[in-house]
Image: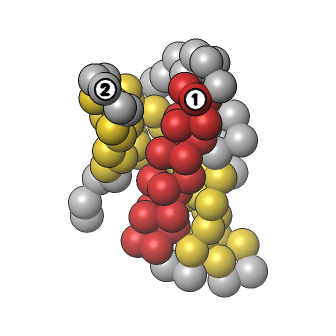
Amino acid sequence: MLTYKSAYKWEDGVCLGEVLDFPGTVSFGRTLDEARKNLAGALQDMAETNLLRGEALPTPNAAASDPEAEIDEPIYLVLQVGQSISMHVATPTP
């Protein structure tokens, strides 16, 4: 399991989410829960793309931060290696 750092902020009535230590992993939602779910999907897609291209996953950085974020929290990426790659992403539950 890899623990990345997610951050959320609201702009124009939309919750924007970003995985701070996995470049390019962003999403949004009308609510925080929707943004969390969408960001988990984006993280899974980005990780899968990296692996299929033979690229390493970014190293998680617990110190990553966004001073403009209203919420930051861990987001978990679980990889299972075998005949095929299986991934699960979890976000904290309120």
Which residue type carries mark 1? Leu
Q: Is residue 50 above or below residue 39?
A: above
Percent of width and height locating residue 54: 61, 18
Quarter of the image where one finds residue 77? top left
Pick whichever, 94 or 4, lies toward us. Answer: 4
Name the residue nearer the viewer: 86 or 34: 86
Q: Quadrant of the N terminus?
A: top left
Q: Which residue is mark 1?
A: 52
Q: Residue at x 45, y 53 (%)?
A: 40
Find numbered disc 2 in the image and state the secondary structure of the residue it sits on. loop
Please say if 90 is above or below 80: below
Q: Which quadrant would residue 13 be assigned to in this image?
A: bottom right
> Where residue 89 appears, x then y in whole percent?
36, 46
Which label number is shown at residue 83?
A: 2
Q: Secondary structure at mark 1?
A: helix
Which residue occupies 52% across, 37% down? 48
Closer to the camera in the image, 21 or 40: 40
| Position of the C terminus by quadrant | bottom left
Q: Is residue 76 visible?
A: no
Specify the label residue 10 is tagged with: none
State the image coordinates of residue 70 (x, y, percent, origin top left): 56, 58
Left/right of residue 35 with respect to residue 25 in the rendered view: left
Residue drawn at x 33%, y 38% is 86
Using residue 50 as the reference point, say whether residue 34 is left or right of it. left
